[in-house]
Amino acid sequence: MLFQVSVFRNTMDGQSRKHRILMVSDFFFPNFGGVESHIYYLSQCLLKLRHKVVVMTHAYGKRSGVRYVTDGLKVYYVPWRPFLMQNTLPTLFMTFPIIRTILIREKISVVHGHQAFSTMCHEALMHARTMGYKFTLADIDQAICVSHTSKENTVLR
């Protein structure tokens, strides 16, 4: 399930507004899975539409720091280690400095969180809210669900 999605509105002159999108999840390559593939391919499609896309995830083994992958997709492998099922330990306030730095440095306009069980996703969205970004399911423009059951559960929440 995807949490934060912005509507791509047209500007006054009819041109599409280009966004700077931060994809955040505990789940990304080099691991393989549905969420990892979805984030990668969605990012590639958005890059082809000439949006700037940046991914933020935790370190994987020795893979830490900033890396570039296909078509200029920038990935921040922040130096946090997963503790259970590829999720990082919830820290609340200790994550704020790095998230704030990425949001400001990359001039992010949309924070797009992935996976309901991603600690990093929820912390990034919480910190983005303190900086004026919209928040998970409270005041978002749209939500995408992967099934009717997921939609029903999201509406109930």
Image (cartoon, grey):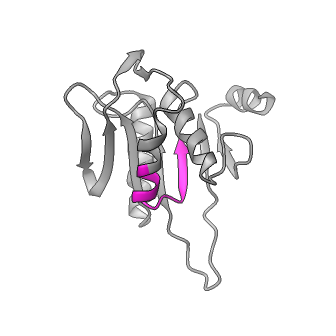
Residue at image position (41%, 43%) is: 98
Q: Residue at x 45, y 20 (%)?
A: 89
Check residue 55 for magenta coloring: no
Name, please, the residue furthest toward the bottom: 13
Report the quarter where the N terminus lies: top right
Q: Residue at x 42, y 55 (%)?
A: 45
Which residue sits furthest right?
156
Q: Quadrant of residue 9?
A: bottom right
Residue toward you, 83 or 148:
83
Quadrant of image for the C terminus: top right
* Quarter of the rendering containing residue 125: top right
Residue 103 image offset from top left, x and y in percent: 46, 53
Left or right of 92? Residue 88 is left
Residue drawn at the location 44% of the way across and 39% of the way down? 38
Residue 19 seen in render: yes
Q: Please, is residue 29 above or below residue 111 in the view?
A: above
Q: Residue 61 appears at what percent x and percent y? A: 23, 24
Q: Would you say residue 102 sits in the magenta stretch?
A: yes
In the depicted structure, whether residue 83 falls above or below residue 15: above
Residue closest to the far top: 84
What stretch of residues is rendered in magenta?
Answer: 101-114
Q: How many numbered badges does the structure rendering display?
A: 0
Q: Is residue 114 visible?
A: no
Image coords of residue 28 (percent x, y) = 37, 34
